[in-house]
Amino acid sequence: MASLEFGLAKFGQLDQPLAISFTAVPYANKQSIRENAASASSAIIDITLPMPKNINAQNSITYESGQTETTGGLFDMTTGGWGEWFKSGGGLFSAFNDLTGISAFQGKRPMDERDSIFRGADFRSHSYSWVLIPKNHAEAVAVKDIAYGFQTTAYPRKSGMESYSRVIHPPVWHIKGLDGRGSGTSPSMREWTMEPLPSVLTSVNVQTAGAAGPGIYTISGGYPAATKIDVTFKELEPAINDGTGQLLSRSQLRSGATSPEGD
């Protein structure tokens, strides 16, 4: 499927310095392949749009309450821990008070040794939203192709002869910001895009009637005069801090890859 663009005739000029591209490539279950950046030869669809009116990145980290192996205890090797060991007679005084009920009488109870224990980070979600208003028939067709392109590639594809019992996994998306001021991709893009890692497309919402106000509007050819598109992506693998303040996918980290948008 050919690359799709909309409203980028003036891309590179000061009135539209920033854009964002969405490139879908075939799914791979091998990590050595997953970390590779999308290439034009393998792209299923390549959509370039102006910087969205809305960009949202959701980060959710999971902790649970529990006791770790590093908390306190009788043989805590910290300075305070050794002091507690001596003051309690190696724990004998505390044990005697517990057994005789003196601790309970004095209102003493064991120190709460729980921590918030890290259990994992949910896969990040990235959401984008546009209202695309074509100026002519050609742009109206491009808007329609973009809307259908997002919708169709979100679903599995038939696998040929085995289409009755087997389907092909939806593609993986590579999302990157483009600097139209002549530098292509640049480090400044991460402030705009928040560096999405390779992702799958989980939600596509398309609104035509009423997208630009009440009622239905059409232009020459019968296309909607405005189309609102909302898409949400979820990253394919866990995000990991590489130690330099950048997030990489598990496959990228294991392969020694660097941030796709520079330092």
Image: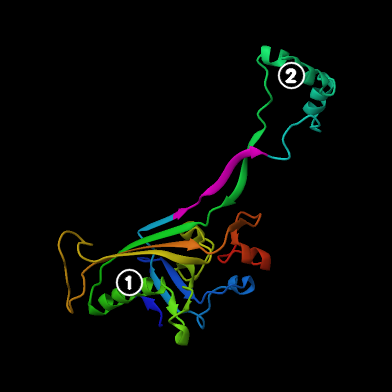
Tell me the kind of residue under disc 1. Ala
Left or right: residue 70 versus residue 146 is right
Stretch of the chain drawn in magenta: 57-67
Q: Is residue 7 above or below residue 244?
A: below
Q: Position of residue 152 (x, y in %)?
A: 37, 74
Q: Secondary structure at mark 1?
A: helix
Tell me the kind of residue under disc 2. Asp
Q: Secondary structure at mark 2?
A: helix
What residue is shown at x 23% (from left), y 62% (from top)? Answer: 211
Left or right: residue 93 versus residue 33 is right
Asked if the stretch drawn in magenta spans residue 63, the answer is yes
Q: Which mark is residue 98?
A: 2
Left or right: residue 170 versus residue 214 is right
Residue 153, can we see it? yes
Asked if the stretch drawn in magenta spans residue 30, the answer is no
What residue is shown at x 73% (from left), y 39% (from top)? Answer: 70
Residue 10, can we see it? no
Nearer to us in this view, 26 or 258: 26
Nearer to us in this view, 89 or 76: 89
Quarter in which the N terminus is drawn: bottom left
Q: Position of residue 212 (x, y in %)?
A: 21, 62
What residue is shown at x 30% (from left), y 73% (from top)? Answer: 143
Residue bearing the label numbered 1: 147
